[in-house]
Amino acid sequence: MAALGWLTPRRRSATARSVLAGEASAEAARKTAQTLDGADGIDADAGPPAEPEFPVAGDDLAAAFFDLDNTVMQGAAIFHFGRGLYKREFFHRRELARFAWQQAWFRLAGVEDPEHMQDARDSALSIVKGHKVSELMSIGEEIYDEYMAERIWPGTRALAQAHLDAGQKVWLVTAAPVETATIIARRLGLTGALGTVAESVDGIYTGRLVGEPLHGPAKAEAVRALAAAEGLDLERCAAYSDSHNDIPMLSLVGHPYAINPDTKLRKHARAHDWRLRDYRTGRKAVKVGVPAAAGVGAIAGGAAAAIALHRRRK
């Protein structure tokens, strides 16, 4: 891919796979953003967004970068996507239980666990292998309406719209597949999306990634690469996330915001005088929710026990 040409020897020796993943995502984001230019803005059918708390000044050298899972949307996009694929018989009940277990862990723990998120993406890659990219994009539109649209946080939507109203570009930055992220960005009227890039040959998924999942340091590399390509000044940009895993991305910009933060990010944000905002209500109830489509209530109990044991061992 053309993104390979952006690598420098200095950066390759440090985090080669993160850089590759980030730059591949930036290249894909810039390509897909061209198809989103005619978007009409945030969907009106979800009601008017709340008034944003953080003022945004117009600046054509600035942009905003939003994490997706638990920042813009409740839960993890990859799990909702898996539910939609199960409904369409892409895989069987045992694999659905696996997705449900991972979603239960994600909600009960309240943070992203890299091992579980990686496991979820490995599952997704094996499921989509051999399928057409165009087929998954079409299905993704339907899955957004079925499982994701009603899970968008109104407060975060308002923040994104404030940046758009100020004439700035707004990008999602997520470990979810770039195709899924692009659909969500388009439906929200955003500029585009940085996401994990799955390899495809002649429009068919191979079951492999370009680099690694866009997680942690890879997100920072994606933002850095996109900012360079777009001529942005990162000191004038803003970034929003709920997870301490995104501290590398948040630390890149001049205006970092902790949205619905996990414990580690909340502590870091307070120590560094970052702005915080929590749009969650009934926080504990949100954490213990399990996808209704899973139909396996025992999974939540098992996940809770496993998390408790995991924490005791730490």
Image: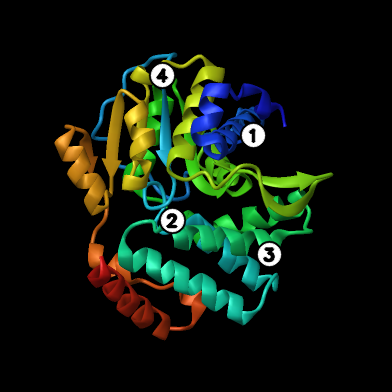
Q: Nearer the viewer, mark 1 or mark 2?
A: 2
Q: Amino acid at mark 4?
A: Ala
Q: Residues within 10 Å of mark 1 (few under 14, many from 20)?
A: many
Q: CA distance from mark 3 to mark 1?
A: 22 Å
In the rendered structure, which disc, 3 or 1, sits on the residue that comes first in sequence?
1
Residue 51 lies left or right of residue 302; in this view the side is left
Q: Amino acid at mark 1?
A: Ala
Q: Secondary structure at mark 3?
A: helix
Q: Amino acid at mark 3?
A: Ile
Residue 3 lies left or right of residue 150; in this view the side is right
Residue 28's label in the rendered image is 1
Please provide percent x and percent y for residue 157: 39, 41
Q: Residue furthest front?
A: 13
Q: Nearer the viewer, mark 2 or mark 3?
A: 2
In the image, what residue occupies the spot 62% across and 34% down? 24
Q: CA distance from mark 1 to mark 2?
A: 23 Å
Observer able to see residue 32: yes
Q: Residues within 10 Å of mark 2 (few under 14, many from 20)?
A: few
In the rendered structure, which disc, 1 or 4, sits on the residue that comes first in sequence?
1
Q: CA distance from mark 4 to mark 3?
A: 38 Å
- Residue identified by numbered label 4: 62
Asked if disc 1 and disc 2 are in contact, CB closer than 8 Å, the reply is no
Residue 127's label in the rendered image is 3
In the rendered structure, which disc, 1 or 2, sits on the residue that comes first in sequence?
1
- Residue identified by numbered label 2: 114
Q: Amino acid at mark 2?
A: Pro
Please provide percent x and percent y for residue 52: 28, 35
